[in-house]
Amino acid sequence: MITCENLVKIYKTADIEVMALQGLNLEVKQGEMMAIIGNSGSGKSTLLNMLGGLDRPSAGRLTIDGIDMQKLTDQELSRYKRETAGFVWQNKARNLIPYLTARENVEIPMLLHDRKEKRKRAIELLEAVGLGHRLNNRLEQLSGGEQQRVAIAISLANRPKLLLADEPTGALDTRTSAQVMELLRNLNAQLGITIVIVTHDLDLAKQVDRVVAIRDGRTSSEMIRRADEIEAADGAGGSAESDDTHVEYAVMDRSGRLQVPEHYLEAIGARNADKVLLRLEEERIVLLPAHWKSHEKM
């Protein structure tokens, strides 16, 4: 569904030049539900904007559903944003118009549709997200979780193939967050829609099968849910809650470069070091702090 190859994004002003993405590589399969995590300034929001057609790469290659995003005309890009990608924002003001009802909000992306058709579609979507009884309620009559459900219904109005969620539970309490994540999982399973969630919350991210970490504009590591945990979660109708649900992999580029996850460097006392000691032991590559001595035990 998504292929990013050596993706670069440079923002320029009169005085400075900022490289938000520095050769990022990523693949997302059709129908996958995955999460992208990273600290502020890591490049995850820049990537989300490019996946949604809100920005274009400075260099590299980006294809979505077979579309080369850099070759799109402005008209084709507008069609892509309207028909292929749906957005759910953390800031409800970007999702919803407060003086409209829930149904009227969902109808907005379907302005070009027949009046009866778009009303029918809006009702179907609100029923699908559990708000069939809230069709004519205005926003002040809805809870935060209900408002986010309306936002998800809006994002699905034009039957997109890709749903992009930017911190979709960031403004919600723990219980409501769990309900929204369960809704997204159900939509992914029922509709087969590809869902990419951007978040800084690792606990939230671990509710999906694959988590990609971005650091300094590059993919640094991936966490894949263990097969036994997937089976347990499926059998329980939800996600497993233990801390050891995923296996972490460092992402290596074609030149053999990789970023060591920060918590591994912290564990060996090399968090702020400019170099580490590299050893090949039997079939293992071992990283040690630069001050490590051969007589010390691992």
Image (cartoon, rainbow, N blue to C red):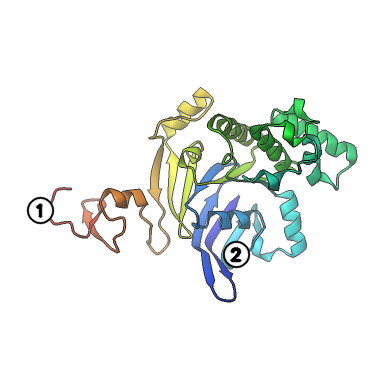
Q: Does residue 160 appear in the picture of this structure?
A: no
Rendered view: 7 above or below 132: below
Q: Position of residue 202 (x, y in %)?
A: 46, 42
Name the residue type under label 1.
Answer: His
Dot 1: within a 10 Å radius of its alpha carbon, few (fewer than 14), some, or many (20 or more) residues? few
Q: Residue at x 53, y 54 (%)?
A: 44
Q: Alpha carbon of mark 2 to alpha carbon of mark 1: how far?
A: 50 Å
Q: Residue furthest bottom?
A: 14
Rendered view: 126 above or below 93: above
Name the residue type under label 2.
Answer: Pro
Q: Residue at x 71, y 32 (%)?
A: 142
State which quadrant residue 167 falls in: top right
Residue indicated by mark 1 = 295
Q: Nearer the viewer, residue 263 or 60?
A: 263
Residue indicated by mark 2 = 57
Q: Does residue 116 appear in the picture of this structure?
A: yes
Q: Nearer the viewer, residue 265 or 259?
A: 265
Task: Point out which mark residue 263 bears.
Answer: none
Q: Position of residue 296 (x, y in %)?
A: 13, 51
Dot 2: within a 10 Å radius of its alpha carbon, few (fewer than 14), some, or many (20 or more) residues? many
Q: Residue at x 84, y 46 (%)?
A: 111
Q: Position of residue 114 (x, y in %)?
A: 89, 42
Secondary structure at badge 2 equals: loop
Q: Residue at x 55, y 31 (%)?
A: 178
Q: Nearer the viewer, residue 276 or 11?
A: 11
Which label's residue is closer to the chain start, 2 or 1? 2
Q: Nearer the viewer, residue 208 or 271?
A: 271
The reply to whether dot 2 and dot 1 touch (C-beta < 8 Å) is no
